Amino acid sequence: MPKITVLLPVYNSDKYIRESIDSIIAQSFTDWDMLILNEYGSSEVCTSIVKEYESKDSRIKVIQNTKRLGLAESLNLGIREARGEYIARMDADDISKKDRFQKQVDFLDRHPNIAVVGSYQHHFGEDIDWVHAPATDPQQCKSNVIFFCDLCHSTLMLRRSVFEKNALYYDNTYLAEDFELWSRVIDFGDIANIPEILGEYRVGEDNITLEKKSKLHLESGKIVAKTLKRTIGLELSEDESALFNNWKNDYFEIKDYKKKKESYILLSNTLRKIYGKNQEIGFFDDDALLRSIRAKWSWARGGEPFNRMVDVVGGIESIFRTRYPNPYINRFYYFWKENKGIKAKLKKICKKIKELF
């Protein structure tokens, strides 16, 4: 039995699939097998490439879908077929650093409470160069997953026993099947991230369409509401749930001052309710939850990055007393700070303008 089973879903992935598989073959930790989940209808070129790897390396097996399953069900098939103690996620256009598996196996072996471990991830591509650095502490990861999916999917390693024992599978009724799954994982185990870049994420021409972004935006608030009801027994109204749609900042788009003020009041009151209910239940760590609430408020009110974690001194009311610079200026400041290179910045600005019109 291998220590790790790698799940690699592919569909018309011939352009970069070799780089992805080669980065797994090059791992310093060699006790793994790989299930390549080749989607029904995938191109002949892509199928030929993965079959070639299967014939050359006995650790690699191609599972050919006989009907269109979609990403979620392909991954569920892989989880059920996996034999490894741990399951490593990988995407067909991403790259794993050579020591990724060794570091994640060592971490999971030392921390039996961890169900999922990820890492920082470098985003690269044409005029793209930045690092996604999610929270690392398990308590912070747990409270963050209330509001947003701050995990780098193709860096994740899962403890298979936790997923099988608790029937933790992807739900194909959600577009954000990963966010929805991690929101359930926290009932059964902890999530952590290693504070090192162990993966490379390719940002290319297959970007999410505006239509899909809009659907993901509307779905995200429903996932937040579902998580709060399940974990601390707090049921949000439809209006409250919509406050947590997080693929774009709706608050910045409200032009009417009175309506914007009302939205901020409703958000602050809802965040207070979440904090108060958790104090009764105690599901989330108090300090971690305060940091998550502050991050949500500062994103909505001040244009800060959604995952900027800052310690809260003075209790929850201190969060809402914070004065922010003009939110558009603040937002631009973080955009300029986190994106490298003038050319890349200008290209992103032009892309946003095109999306608006």
Image (tube, rainbow, N blue to C red):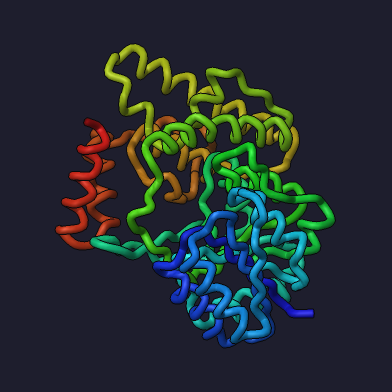
How far from the left and from the top, in percent, is residue 351?
23, 44
Q: Is residue 223 left or right of residue 249?
A: right
Between 289 and 96, which is closer to the camera in this rendering? 96
Between 76 and 247, which is closer to the camera in this rendering? 76
User: Residue at 45% of width from left, 20% of height from top?
Assistant: 265
How far from the left and from the top, in percent, is residue 213?
42, 38
Give the quarter of the image for residue 131: bottom left
Q: Residue furthest right?
A: 165
User: Residue at 77% of width from left, 71% of height from top?
Assistant: 83
Quarter in which the C terminus is drawn? top left
Q: Is residue 125 left or right of residue 11?
A: left
Between 56 and 34, which is closer to the camera in this rendering? 56
Is residue 4 in view from this perspective? yes
Quarter in which the N terminus is drawn? bottom right
How far from the left and from the top, in percent, is residue 230?
73, 34
Q: Residue furthest front?
A: 44
Between 80 and 327, which is closer to the camera in this rendering? 80
How far from the left and from the top, in percent, is residue 39?
58, 57
Q: Is residue 78 above or below residue 318?
A: below
